[in-house]
Image (spheres, rainbow, N blue to C red):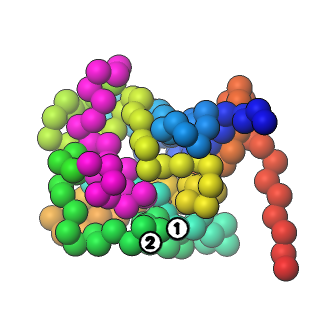
Amino acid sequence: RHLETKVAKTLINSKGIKGELTLMQRSIFEPTFLNFTFKTTDGSLKSDFEFAKNIASYKIHELPPSPIYESESQYCDTAGEIFNPRDIDQKNIPPPGYGTQDQYAIGDLSGKLTGRNKNEQHDFIIEDGTNELNGIYWDIFAPLFGRHSIVYRGFSINQRQDNATESPIGCSFFALYDSNQRYQVQMQTAQV
């Protein structure tokens, strides 16, 4: 049976940040490829530097943000906790980039991808010492197929508030696209 490549995208245009994260997985037996393209809306070097310096994390959440709260400040908070179906203890994980992908929650993109894939072409604003992700990465634990799929789950970019807390810069959800990445696939829901 022929399997079609799955493509999912999330678009963010919020608080001076715009861009998209595109995910592609050819089959359940291959890793998911993630292409991050986030920049500031004005495109100035100073703004890009501030954005990159203040990034705390990129996360996938349990739920998509609720459209009811779209124009309210708690919109991103409605996406729930970080997506962690394997119940990884979040208190005992290595710092971002220092562990293997299986040591982090599925939704902890910063932990799994920071400092990885240096052989691929990347467009970092700040080379080292930041959680910025820009370019192409691969992730074995971010499936687009199966029961732990991240399709239609929430996504957020978070900034540092102080040393202990983070707050979302922007959030969205992953929608399926056709294999040409031009059109969003129609979503069907059912109620029982």
Q: Are marks 2 and 1 in contact (CB under 8 Å)?
A: yes
Q: At x 29% / y 64%, what residue is drawn?
A: 166
Question: In this rendering, does residue 46 appear at all?
Answer: no
Q: Secondary structure at mark 2?
A: loop
Q: What stretch of residues is rendered in magenta? A: 100-121
Q: At x 32% / y 49%, what residue is drawn?
A: 101
Q: Residue 48 location, x and y as percent?
A: 31, 35
Q: Residue 52 location, x and y as percent?
A: 27, 40
Residue at the outermost front position: 1
Which residue, given by chain and number where applicable, does mark 1 sit on? Answer: 62
Question: In this rendering, does residue 5 appear at all?
Answer: yes
Dot 1: within a 10 Å radius of its alpha carbon, few (fewer than 14), some, or many (20 or more) residues? many
Q: Is residue 7 magenta?
A: no
Q: Does residue 127 lie above or below 139 as drawn?
A: above
Front residue of this view, candidates 34 and 99 = 99
Label 1 is placed on what type of residue?
Glu
Q: Quadrant of residue 81?
A: bottom left
Q: Secondary structure at mark 1?
A: loop
The quadrant of the image that shows the C terminus is: bottom right
Task: Find residue 76 and name its label.
Answer: none
Q: Is residue 41 left or right of residue 75?
A: left
Q: Does residue 48 lie above or below 154 as drawn?
A: above
Mark 2 / mark 1, whichever is N-terminal: 1
Residue at the outermost bottom position: 192
Q: Residue 77 location, x and y as percent?
A: 48, 72
The CA distance from mark 2 to mark 1 is: 6 Å
Q: Does residue 31 lie above or below 75 as drawn?
A: above
The quadrant of the image that shows the N terminus is: top right
Which residue, given by chain and number where applicable, does mark 2 sit on? Answer: 81
